[in-house]
Structures are given as structure tokens and as C-alpha cells.
Amino acid sequence: MLPDTAGQRRQDLTEKLLAAFEGSVPHVWKSPFYLFGLLIVATVILLLPLVYLGLIVLTGYGLYYHILNHVDILDMPARIHGRGVIGIMTLRLAAYFGPILIGMILLVFMIKPLFARPARSERRLSFVRENEPVLFAFVDKLCEVVRAPVPRRIDVDCDINAAAFFRRGFLSFLGRDLVLQIGAPLVAGLSLREFAGVLAHEFGHFSQGTGMRLTYIVGSVNGWFARVVYQRDTWDEQLVALSQEQGWFRLFFLVARLFVWLTRWILWMLMIVAHAVSCSLLRQMEYDADRYWAHVCGSECSESNLKRLHVLAKGSQTAFAFIAHCWQERRLPENLPSLIVAEAERLSPEARQQIEKDISESRTHMLATHPSYRARIQRMRSENEPGIFRLAEPASVLFADFDALCREASFAYYQGLIGPEVRREHLLSMTQVVRKRKVLDEIAEAARRFWTTLDFVTRPFRINRFSPVVDLPPKECLEQLKRARLALERSQQTIRREYARLRELDQTISNARQAECLLKAGFRVDPREIGLKKADPSQAHQVGRQAERDRRATEERLAKIEAVFAMRLEAALALLKCDQVAARLRNAAVLRARSEELLDVTAGLHRVEYLLTSLRLNQNSLRAMEDAIGHGHEDDALIAQTLRLLEAQNRALKELREATKEVCYPYEHAAGPLSISQYAIGIVPAVNDLTGTTAAVVSCLDCLFPLYLRVMGDLARIAEQVEAAVGLQPLAMTEDAPAAVQPS
């Protein structure tokens, strides 16, 4: 396109957008009593950090007083001689210098939150007027109609959100120096009318200068409290490490950790007070901003817009699940906003009905900073506004090259989320993404139809590639296939019942193991949660053993059912090798080679299924230990129990890595051909590395169980193609039969 033509089109579009605004939004009046209340809240919020500063001064003065006035503790009585001198002197040194050491540590950890900074946010793209003239003209007009200050800069990221804030924080507090932050998925998934309503809501917060600044103070202080209470850094980790060292000197660091915990408890109390004082007024601010939303795009549109945002949020969840799968193969969709919108459009009617139900049943909690969506919709309806802007074109027309923008924003988001290891060669075009998603959907659907309720996580499925069925004549093989299909069709209820019982017993075993570990480490466990009469390690062990016995009995019954599933698959794969059947298939040679490759993988995974089961069941107990340690509940019994679990997990990881290093990963990977070991495990952390081992086990299980389901789905898809070639339709599941279970 010629430059002058592009410029003329931008000019025409700008004029069309500006002309579409039919009037301005009436001023949302706030009573003096409301502003006075907001002033009181902001004053109280500002006083809370001063209370904390007073505690720091008091602690410092106590340390100063001890240093000056208790030095006589070091004086030794003249009547003590001999061996008693060393012991008495050691105690006196500890009594004098111990509080100094603990007090200094406490002061450091009390002062540190004053300089806490927000965690580094993901990278985003920034634009000024010269970059996107149409967008800025649209935003300027919108600010004019809602009487809000105009932003100097517009940032774009990949969140499903929009926000306006002071560009330089408190340095811009007294001016009108704003930044508008836009989530690209909003632009991709909304019309111009809907997008204008969302931005009007954000600018509505800034339409009142006094309220805007007081609200900024409240939000900043609340955010600071949340960071200093929950955020941890290397200093905290070092203090924990010192308190775990051997020797009596660790006592000082344990006491210091106790005082640091008390400090954070005080901060937590102040945070709750600040939150409780401010939440009611913050909810009112949201109602006021929603009025701008309804006046700009209309009450009816703003209601559907809120629901649309829920749909996009749900699409984002499924999109990120897909991204997690892609990154296991070191691939990423190059256009995240388009993927989110596509996933939102793919939502089932049941999922959309659930969203409607969640909105209609939502309630406003007492400490919530935002009203419930139900309450907000009711307020919007009460405005009964037609809206002053009603253009229904896609919001993406505001940008000169929205696709290129989304690709750049996605790459910046991935690098901020994952790190610099993300490179552009890892990115998949949307055409490749659609093709990959289609294949995965077909595999999942084939697994759902073919394997029905089989749970490959709780009980891995065995396939005998050397089954006697392979040597049967084609006619007898076909008869075996038909008999297996008929038996499965008649046994749906039995299959569902037995696998439901298996999952129930598996959960009992996991709970019992977790309870046994916690009880041995000295923790309290509610016995009713796992069916115990009393909280006792031997009781938990007994419950677990009984569940294991019941599980074995259930597995014996399941073995007969699984034999029928196996017969169906083995007969179909045997028919694939028959020339008469192969002639009816367009790609029989490819399917044969593919089935052999997949069977190699299933054989490799079958050999290590006991390791996968051990890792999975022990992981729940290890997470409980990690959570207990993270909350400061440490003693020798807990450490010893945690180390035993770590050794077991570490040993299982090493055995699993060794056993799968010759098994080839059957799908495309950015790194080229690699083994299952390289795909799922990599480097095994040190035995005493709790965080590293936990992450390694979770990563391993998140790779291997979905891989197992994918392989079984691929085999099912091949078998169904063979069945279609011999004139058999896919088996229809009964309506209440759940799909094959896939781990989250």
C-alpha cells in the first residue's frame, strides 16, 4: 500500500470514529460526605505505615537501651574460679550479645520492607502518538467525553485487562501524567463499542481529581502491605538456611526467625485493617466507574460486555493449558491474543452456561474491593442508557498493524514469563497452531470414544504387542474385534463403577500416606478427612494398607475389563497388517510404522509404571512437607521425614531417567529427535534440594502422563481408522459416561 493511501485511510477512519460519539457523558456527582469519607480512609491508611515505623523506632530504642544499660552482664564475680569460669562467661556473653544479634537481624528485616519494590513485571510494548495516531485520537476523544486527563503513553501487554495509572507513581501524583495500559486480547476479542466501554470505565476512575488521588493513595498502601507480607527474597532464604545449621549457634537464628515471623504477623494485621477500612469505598468507586461504562456503550452492551470478559478469561485458561503443552516441546504460539480469542470461541455450550450461572450467583463479600458481577450488572441496568458510541467494528482497526503488534506483545510476554531462553525460532504461526490444535483435539476425542473411562494416571494400561491375536487369520481377527466391541458396549456401567472405585481407593491411599508422614513429623491431622478413628501414624498406615488391598481386588476385576479393551486394539492393529484391509486405507504403510513407534513408547512406559506411581503418590506428601516448612514449622522429625521422601523421589527420578533414555519421544520437538528421558527429566537435582526436586517431579509427571494419554489416543485413532475400513462405526458412549481422565 502506498504511504499516501495508508495515511488517507487512517485520516478517514479517525474522522469516522470521532463523528460516532454522540454527545458526552453527564458528570457523575459525588457528595461532599463521600469525598470526606474517602479523605478519612486515606488518612487512616497513611497512618498505618507510621504505626509500623513507630514499632521500628521502638525496637531500635530497645536494642540501644540493652547495649548501654546491660553491659554489666559481662562482669565476672570474683569468687568463681576454675572450670566454672568458662561456662559462666559463655552464658554471660550469650546473654549480652545474643539479644544484640537477634535485635540487629530483626531490625534489618523490619526495615527491609520499607524498601520493597514490586516484582519485575512482564515486558510490554509502549506507544506514543506518532506510532498509533488513530488509537490516540480515539482515546483523546473518549477522555474528552468522560472528562478525564489524556494519557501521554499507551502500553500494550497480553493481559485480559485495561488500566490507567500515574506514569511515574507519586512523582506524577499532583499532575495529570497518565499511562493507559491495554491488554491485546481485549482488542482482539471486543468490538469498538465494547472496547470503548471498558476504557470509559478505567478513565472514569480519573474523572474526579480528588477522588482519583485519594484512591491512588489507598491502592498504593494496600499493595505495599501485600508485597511486604507475602513476598520473600534471598535474605529470607539465607536466614532459614542458617537456622538449620548444626550446633547451638542456630538457636539465635531460630529466635530471630520467630521475631521476623512476629513482624510479618503485625504487618499482616495492619494489612487486614487497611483492607477492611478501604474496601467499601473502593467498591463504590467501581460502581461510579461502571456508570461511565454504561453511558458510553449503553446499559445492554455493558452487561453483555462483562459476560464477554468472563468468556475471554475462560478462553485464556484453556489457551495457557495449550501453551504449557506446547512449551514441553519448546514451541509457543506466536499470537497469544488470537489464540485466547479462538479458545474462547471454542467453549462448549455447557461452559458458557456455567459462566452465566457463576455470574448470576455471585455475591459481594464484606472484604471485597470490587462488587460482585451480579450487583454491577444490576446497577448498569438501572442506568437504562442507550450509549453515546455504537460502532460495532472490531477494535483492532484502531491499530496500524494489529497482527504484528500481537506477535511482538506475545514474544515480549513469553520472555517476561519464561526468560531469555525463549527465542523467535520457538514460535509457531497461527496456521501451525490451528493444525496442531486440530490434531490434539482429534486424538483426545478418539481417546474419549475408544477408551471411555480408562484412567491412565491411576492405572496405566498394558498392551501386548505380541498378542496371539496377531497370528489369527483376518476373518477370525475381525470376529474377535466385533466380540470385543460388543462386550464393551454392554459393560459401560460396570466399567464406570469399577474405575470410580479405583480412583476413590487411590485417593484414600494418597491421603493415608500424606497423613502418616505428617503425623510422624509431629503435625496434627483431622482424622475425619481420611476416615481415621484417631490421628495416629499406625492408624493412617493401617488405612493405607487396607486401601491397597482393596485396590488390588479392584484391579483384578479391572484386568478382565482391560483384556477386552486390549483385544479390541490388538485385533485392529493386526488387521492393519492384512493386505486386504490395508488396501482400503489411504496411508496404511504410514499407519503401520506409526503404530509400531507408538507401541515402543507404551512398552517403555509400562516398564516404569511403578516408578510413576511412586512419584505421584509420594509427591502429595512431599508437597505437604514443603508447605509446612514454608510456614516455619520445622523440627528434627519434620526434616528427617522430608529427607526420607526426598531420597525416595530422587532415587525414582534417576531410575526413571535411566530406564527411558533409549525410548524415543514420538512427536516433533524443537530440539530435534530426543529420548523420553531428555523430554521429561533432564538433570536430577541434589538429594537435599527440596524445591528443585519438587519442581523436577512435577515437571516429569506433567510431561509423562499427558504423553501417555496422547500416545493411547493416537493408537485409538489408528484403530478407529482400521475399524472404519472394515465397515465398523465408532462406538457410541452413553451420555453419563465420563471421558478418559487426563491429569491437570
Image (cartoon, rainbow, N blue to C red):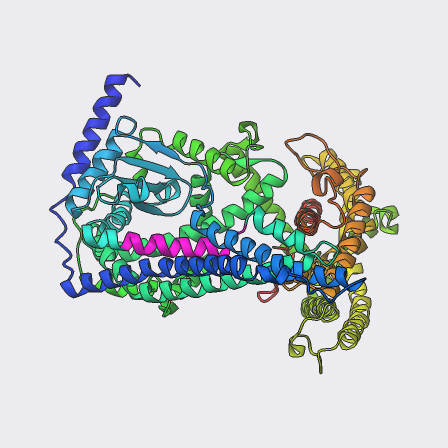
Q: Is the magenta stretch mostly helix, strand or loop?
A: helix
Residue 507: x percent and y percent? 69, 67
Is residue 585 depicted above or below 689 in this figure? Answer: above
Marker count (numbered): 0
Residue 244 position within the rendered picture, expressed as x and y whole percent measured from the top left: 70, 55
Direction from residue 170 to residue 65 in the image, left or right: right
Residue drawn at x 35%, y 68% as measured from the top left: 364
Quarter of the figure with the N terminus = top left
| Side of 21 where 343 appears, left or right | right
With respect to residue 334, does 284 lie above or below? below
Residue 661: x %, y % from top left:
80, 39
Q: Is residue 420 within the magenta segment?
A: no
Residue 726 visible in the current orientation:
no
Residue 383 image position (x, y, % from top left): 18, 61
Q: Which quadrant of the view contains residue 564? A: bottom right
Left or right: 274 in relation to 440: left
Q: Give the residue at x 58% y 59%.
A: 71
Direction front: furthest residue: 78
Nearest the camera: 171 or 260? 260
Q: Quadrant of the C terminus?
A: bottom right
Location of residue 57 (image quadrant) = bottom left
Quadrant assignment, res 436: top right
Q: Nearer the viewer, residue 28 or 733?
A: 28
Residue 126 appears in the picture as rendered:
yes
Span colored in magenta: 215-232
Q: Nearer the viewer, residue 562 or 34?
A: 34
**With respect to residue 602, does 13 lie above or below?**
above
Residue toward you, 636 or 147: 636
Residue 228 on the magenta segment: yes
